[in-house]
Amino acid sequence: MKAIIPVAGAGTKLRPLTYTQPKALIPIAGKTILSVIVDQLINAGVSEFVFVIGYLGEKIQDYVAKHYPHLSCTFVTQNDRKGTGHAIWLTQDAIQNDEVMIVLGDTICDYNVKKILQSTTSQIGVRRVDDPRDFGVAELTNEDKVLHVVEKPLIPKSNMAMVGIYFIKETNILFNTLNELVCKDCDKEDEFSLTNAIEYMIVEKSVRFDAFRVNTWFDCGKKESLLSTNATLLQKTENHSFVTHAGCVIIDPVSIAEGCVIKNSIIGPNVTIGEHTKIESSIIKNSIIGSFAQLEDIVLHASIIGNDAFVRGGSQSLNIGDNTEIDLS
């Protein structure tokens, strides 16, 4: 079984953090967004991965090589960001006619992956939302057969949002459809949506798609939802803390990576801290702190701090990219 994970996006809604860090590699609950997705698929029996990379793609490659040295994987570069349909189209030589799982690289969901891989029909993950206009939307029968899909409709006919997980059995039809859509308008600047290709497969090629409902859905594309995801996953997983320094109070749930030095500080709840970070005389709660950061005399809440950042003084809610120095004293 093969999986495609598109991680070529620039993560503009999380800037400045994503100027130097791929969104998929942001630490979350002791892992990264990418590792949560990959581990979930590996545990379900997926054996081959195709990563669609672009912006800061070399960091994705380095991360996979370091953390998954035995993983069978292929990297495909999307130089022009022309949408998810275009990203999937680029993988056709790697996928050929194999069945495939497609999981967008900023989506974490709770669902039975093994059950989906055993499906006799193609599948689309969905979740009911209050306002579906910002998502791809699926129209379903009472038996959860997919009738139509549409990308970000102005007037939605359904409140079932597509979460960014697809299991496709008829990959030959998928790639033939994408070839037709992409090659026909290859000189245009438009983005090519995977949703449009699936709609064509359903309506014109009579391919059956069924919907499966995910238990939880974490869209990690914005600061607020990323922090919320971090808090929820920390509560569901075993807490990891390698800090036992005197003068520190650790309030679970937290995840503190190896090599950290923390003195005279209060950490938690809902805090993830990357490797080799130094924190002194600070209070941190509901935040994500990158690796090799340094924080002194600071009170942080609802904050994201990038790798190698230095912050000192004050009480703030911050979103700070890598290699940044902030002195609030």
Image (spheres, helix red, strand yellow):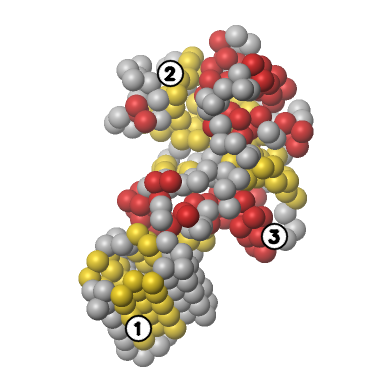
Up-down relation of residue 247 to residue 47 (above or below): below
- Compared across the picture, whether 134 is left or right of 53 comes to left
Front residue of 42/83: it is 83
Up-down relation of residue 121 to residue 225 (above or below): above
**Cα distance between the residues tagged 1 and 2:** 53 Å
Give, as a three-letter code, the residue at label 2.
Glu
Nearest to the eye among marks 1 and 2: give it.
1
Crowd tier of the residue under label 1, counting other residues whose Cα lies within 10 Å: few below 14, some 14–19, many 20 or above: some
Up-down relation of residue 180 to residue 54 (above or below): above
Crowd tier of the residue under label 3, counting other residues whose Cα lies within 10 Å: few below 14, some 14–19, many 20 or above: few
For the point 36% across and 55% down, the residue is: 227
Give, as a three-letter code, the residue at label 3.
Ala
Per the image, label 3 sits on a secondary structure element best described as: helix
Tell me the number on the disc at residue 280: 1
Q: Which residue is mark 3?
A: 65
For the point 41% across and 56% down, the residue is: 16
Marked residue nearer the N-terminal end (1 or 2): 2
Residue 44 in view, yes or no: no
Tell me the number on the disc at residue 219: none
Front residue of 136/244: it is 136
Badge 1 vs badge 2, beta-carbon distance below 8 Å: no
**Cα distance between the residues tagged 3 and 1:** 33 Å
Location of the C terminus (image quadrant): bottom left
Location of the N terminus (image quadrant): top right
Residue 263 rendering spot, x and y as whole percentages: 36, 86
**Residue found at the very far left of the displayed protein:** 315
Marked residue nearer the N-terminal end (3 or 1): 3
Tell me the number on the disc at residue 139: 2
